[in-house]
Image (cartoon, helix red, strand yellow):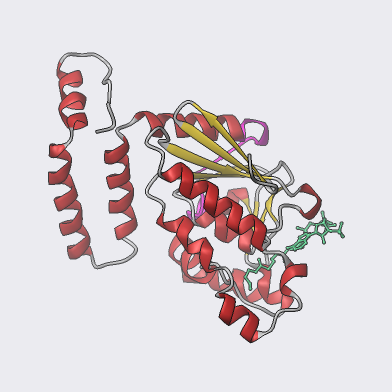
Amino acid sequence: TPYETILVERKGRTALLTLNRPKALNALNLQVMHEIVAAAEELDRDPEVGCIVLTGSDKAFAAGADIKEMHPQDYMDMYLSDWFSAWDRLGRLRTPTIAAVSGYALGGGCELAMLCDILLAADTAVFGQPEIKLGVIPGIGGSQRLTRAVGKAKAMELCLTGRTMDAAEAERAGLVSRVVPAEQLLGEALAVAETVAEMSRPVAMMAKEAVDRAFETTLAEGVRFERRLFHAVFATADQKEGMAAFVDKRPPAFTHR
Ligand code: HXC
């Protein structure tokens, strides 16, 4: 692996990206950003990859953007380098992604988890946007994605006070799809990933596109978009196979075409 701050593993049609900067609780410096984005984009181009899992350590998914790296920057540094803009590319992957969050997911760590499609949490997970305590605000989409995920009331409180939420509160608020005991988190995330990866790859991509569109458009336009994709799946071999398998009472053998 050409990477220093992340580990990349393949298990069948599933890929696992593990943040690996333990001494800094996986703080997201520019190197981490560029490595995750490069690795994820390479996996996204691979037709043999059906789902990507992103995880950290037991103690920290990621304790935020790297404060020590940001500290000396001024406005022109941030503006001219378009600091953090590479993260947007993670949200544009076509392959479904799963964040498996154990421990701290603060600031940029919470934002990174929210860039993924499915968010699974260990019972030890801690979520928050504590940037305000450092005299800054979220910069990787947190003010937007947290608000869409949990609503204005909680997002406003979290962003204005910097207080954190535990896994149970995050699940009640709709930020995470499920909470599992910490020791089962990775196994569960990989099992979900395998389930997704065994579905038709192009159809899973379309399902992801359709759900994502809900955050970008009106209901009428979103339903029209879904209807077009729904019609389009009838051009896939996998639609023929999936429905034939049901009729024949056998498991489908998708060819991801
Ligand atoms: C750089 C970090 C870091 C971070 C932790 N470390 N978080 N380094 N950036 N975000 C480093 C610490 O400096 C320390 O290094 C080592 O990791 C271990 O951290 P400790 O603080 O000693 O661990 P602990 O006491 O267990 O406390 C854990 C913690 C705390 C509660 C998560 O580390 C913490 O509050 N971190 C910052 C959380 C935060 O504010 N995140 C938001 C960042 S801003 P040394 O060398 O001392 O051992 C952000 C903004 C995005 O994400 C957009 C804004 C522009």
Q: Nearer the viewer, residue 12 or 154?
A: 12
**Residue positioned most to the front:** 2
Tell me how many marks there are: 0
- Residue 227 percent location from the top left of the image: 15, 51
**Residue positioned most to the top:** 249
Quadrant location of residue 233? top left
User: Does 160 appear above or below 111?
Assistant: below
- Residue 221 percent location from the top left of the image: 19, 64
**Which residues are the magenta region?**
172-185
Can I make out residue 214 in this image? Answer: yes
Is residue 133 left or right of 218 when viewed as pictured?
A: right
Q: Nearer the viewer, residue 186 or 52?
A: 52
Q: Tell me what residue is drawn at x 28 percent, y 40 percent.
A: 202
Is residue 254 left or right of 246 when viewed as pictured?
A: right
Quadrant location of residue 245? top left
Q: Give the quarter the ligand 1 occupies.
A: bottom right
- Residue 210 percent location from the top left of the image: 28, 52
- Residue 20 percent location from the top left of the image: 70, 45
User: Does 216 appear above or below 93?
Assistant: below
Can I make out residue 192 in this image? Answer: no
Residue 173 magenta: yes
Is residue 193 left or right of 124 when viewed as pictured?
A: left
Q: Nearer the viewer, residue 222 or 4?
A: 4
Q: Tell me what residue is drawn at x 53 percent, y 40 percent.
A: 53
In the rendered image, the quadrant that contains the C terminus is top left
In the rendered image, the quadrant that contains the N terminus is top right
Q: Tell me what residue is drawn at x 65 percent, y 55 percent.
A: 32
Residue 107 magenta: no
